[in-house]
Each structure stands twice: as C-alpha cells, then as structure tokens.
Image: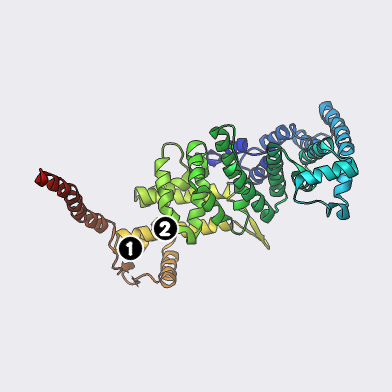
Amino acid sequence: MATHDLTSRIAPHLDRHLVFPMLEFLQDRQLYDDGEILKAKIELLSQTNMVDYAMDIHKTLYHTEDVPQDMVDRRVEVVARLKSLEEAAAPLISFLQNATLVQELRPDKQYNLQMLQDRFQIGPDQIEALYQYAKFQFECGNYSGAADYLYQYRALCTNNDRGLSALWGKLAAEILMQNWDVALEELNHLKDIIDSKNFASPLNQLQNRIWLMHWSLFIFFNHENGRNGIIDLFFQDRYLNAIQTNAHHLLRYVATAVIVNKRRRNMLKELIKVIQQELHSYKDPITEFLECLYINYDFEGAQKKLKECEQVILNDPFLGKRVEDGNFATVPLRDEFLENARLFIFETYCRIHRCIDISLLAEELSMTYDDAERWIMNLVRSSKLDAKIDSVAGTVIMESTHLNVYEQIIESMKNLDMPTRLLAKNVLEPAQVIQTTR
C-alpha cells in the first residue's frame, strides 16, 4: 500500500516539524522499513535545533551510545545561541510577563511602540529579538513557548510580511500541540489574510493557498466540525482551482469528507465533476471508487475499489487515526466510510434495478448474505425507502415512483423538442417582424 502513500507529495508543502507526526504514523503502521523512517527523521532534524532528539534516534538506529562529533558540536552551538537570544529579548519578555504592565497596552500598535520606547527603552531591536527567540524556541521543539511569544510579537509587529510569517509559525505550533480549536481560529485568520493580501505575484498567492490546504488537513481530520470545514474551504472556487492546478492529490481528502458527511451529499455532484475532469492527473482507490460508481456505473469495479479504499484509509496519516477503547482499537473514519460507501452502491444500484437479488447485492457490497439482508432491512426502515424484502425469493423489490436511470435518459430526450421549438420561435419571430416592415 506504499504505492498510495502521499507523504512524499504532501511533505514539501509542510513545515518540517509537521512532517514528524506523519513519519510517526508510518512507523507505527510499519509501511516502510523502520531504518528508513529513522534515517528520514534524522535528515529532518538536521535542519532544526532538536539536537537531543536527533541523538536519541541516532543511538536507536545504529545501536550505540556514541553520537557523531558534529551532533555534539551542534548542541553546544544551539545552547549558546539560545542563551544569546534570551538575553537580547529579556527586557521585552520581562515586560510581557508582568500582567499589570501588559494591561497598559492598547489596540493602537504605534502607541504601544512609543510607550515601550519612552518608558522601558524597548525598541525595534528588542522586538526583533523576540521574534528570533520565538522562532528559535520553535526549532528547539518548545511549541508552547513559541506560540506564546509569536502571539505577543504579532501584537507589536508593524511589518506585514513578518507578521504573516509569525502567524504561520503560530499555526504550526498549535497544530503540533493538538490545540484544534485555536488552530482552526488561526487557520481562518490566515485564510483571510491570504485572500485579501496583495502578493508579489498570483503564483505566490496560489502557493500560499496550497500550503494552507495542506496544513489544514491536520485540523480538519481532528476537529469535531472538520469534515464540514474541509468541504467549505476546498470547494471555494479559488481553492478548488489551486487543487486542480498543483495539488491534485488533495482530492483524496475532500472526496473522503464528502463520502462520510451525510449532511453534505449535495456536494457529491460537484465532486464527481471535478474527479472526471482530473482523471488523467490523479487517481487513487477513493477517487476511482466514485468514478466506477457514478461515472462508469461499474458495480464490480466499485466493489474492488472499496476493498482497496479500506487499506488506503488505514495507512493514511490523516484518515487512519486510531481510537483506543479498552483492549480494542478502532478507526472510526474507516467504519463510517465503508458504511456510507455501501449506501452509495445500494442507492445507485436501486436507481437502475427494480428487483434486486440480495445474494448479488451482498457480493457487490462485500458482505455475507445474512449481513446484507439485515443491513438492507435496517436501511429500508431508517431511510423510509419504498421497498419490500421477499425473504423467500431472496430479493428486494423497489416500488419507488422515481424514474430509473434509463427512463430518465429517455424522458430527457423527449423534453428536448419543447426547448428547441421555443428557441426557434424566439429567433424567427423578430426576423419575421423585420421582414414584414420592409
């Protein structure tokens, strides 16, 4: 299933710290050799200040208590730099830690800057030091401290580009601390800025939208309202265009969100349209399942893809989240996906057939006959379908007055005459009037 792993496509659009949770997931799932994952972690850590963590991984990977001298030297350098930045930012940090003094700050940034300069001799150098200190703390893995300092820095920052950079850092820190409510607020704030900011080029703005969508996956598949959030964001024209331009793999996630979200079934038609447009750019079992079912009406193909979908979900860092319940571990999204996907198959099958063989349908749904019969009975009761189950004959008889697919096509063909006549009438009548007046 490593064939369908999207880590290599997603990682370039993430801060390197956000890649660690993905590698942890892949290591837990044993999708790759453990040594490969550990080497990837060390490579990522080499660009951060998390030297102690890198040393621990090196010891595990090579089964030794010795570490390379360059790691030892790097640790000395990081500690010295941290101390230097802490001293440079100390006056402002001391002020911000005094709740009484902080109450004197106002929404007016210029007033605050002048007040800090006049009364506390805190100027641009100390404010810049706070940003560098916050950034360094983030690179050390102290996400809580970094989030606090970046928040305080943004309250004093007058440089829009630097403020935007701080907001990205704050968002990453909240994600890594799994503060999903706060992270969602920062995500929405960042979206507003990206959509309204005058970027140097449209390509730059496009890239920021693509980054935002990738970072949002952590939030949307953990926040209680995330499945609505991802649909709301990804289906906006500007963001959908970004997906179709340079992030086709994100179709996996929006497709999954639509399938498991019963309240957003109205987006299915638009989703199918996009998947059909991008058939030659991106495919995976989840998009192919929808292609088989709604574009090709290939039920056998949909059944095969549904089995593959289960493995894709289980091995995806965003979709395969496990929930421990005593001695059992479940993947809630996998269960919801399979339930709703089977419902999609059943509904589509019913639109085409009036009398359905339960044994055949069980095969299409990858279920036993008894499980399929119980599932259909519960579905008929809960969704008030106009259907009867003949247990003796082993069939489901649909009594709906809705036209099936073939009848809909015939009816559509019949209705072509009237619009055509009206169009001809609207074109010919003015021409006849002109001809008469000549």
Q: Which residue is mark 1?
A: 357
Number of numbered tags placed on the structure image: 2
Q: Position of residue 345 (x, y in %)?
A: 40, 57
Question: Disc 1 or disc 2, which is closer to the eye?
Answer: 2
Q: Position of residue 229 (x, y in %)?
A: 56, 54
Q: Position of residue 261 (x, y in %)?
A: 50, 58
> Is residue 352 placed above or below 60 in the rendered structure?
below
Q: CA distance from mark 1 to mark 2?
A: 17 Å
Q: Residue at x 63, y 46 (%)?
A: 190
Colour pattern: rainbow
Amino acid type assigned to the residue bearing label 1 in the image? Asp
Quadrant where the N terminus sits is top right
Q: Are marks 1 and 2 in contact (CB under 8 Å)?
A: no
Q: Which residue is mark 2?
A: 344
Q: Position of residue 160 (x, y in %)?
A: 68, 39
**143 or 381, which is in the foreground?**
143
Hey, which residue is sitting farthest top in the picture?
70
Query: What label sits on residue 188 in the rendered view?
Result: none
Q: Residue at x 50, y 43 (%)?
A: 238
**281 or 173, which is in the foreground?**
173
Where, by quadrant of the figure, is residue 41 drawn? top right
SS for dot 2: helix
Where, by quadrant of the figure, is residue 117 drawn? top right
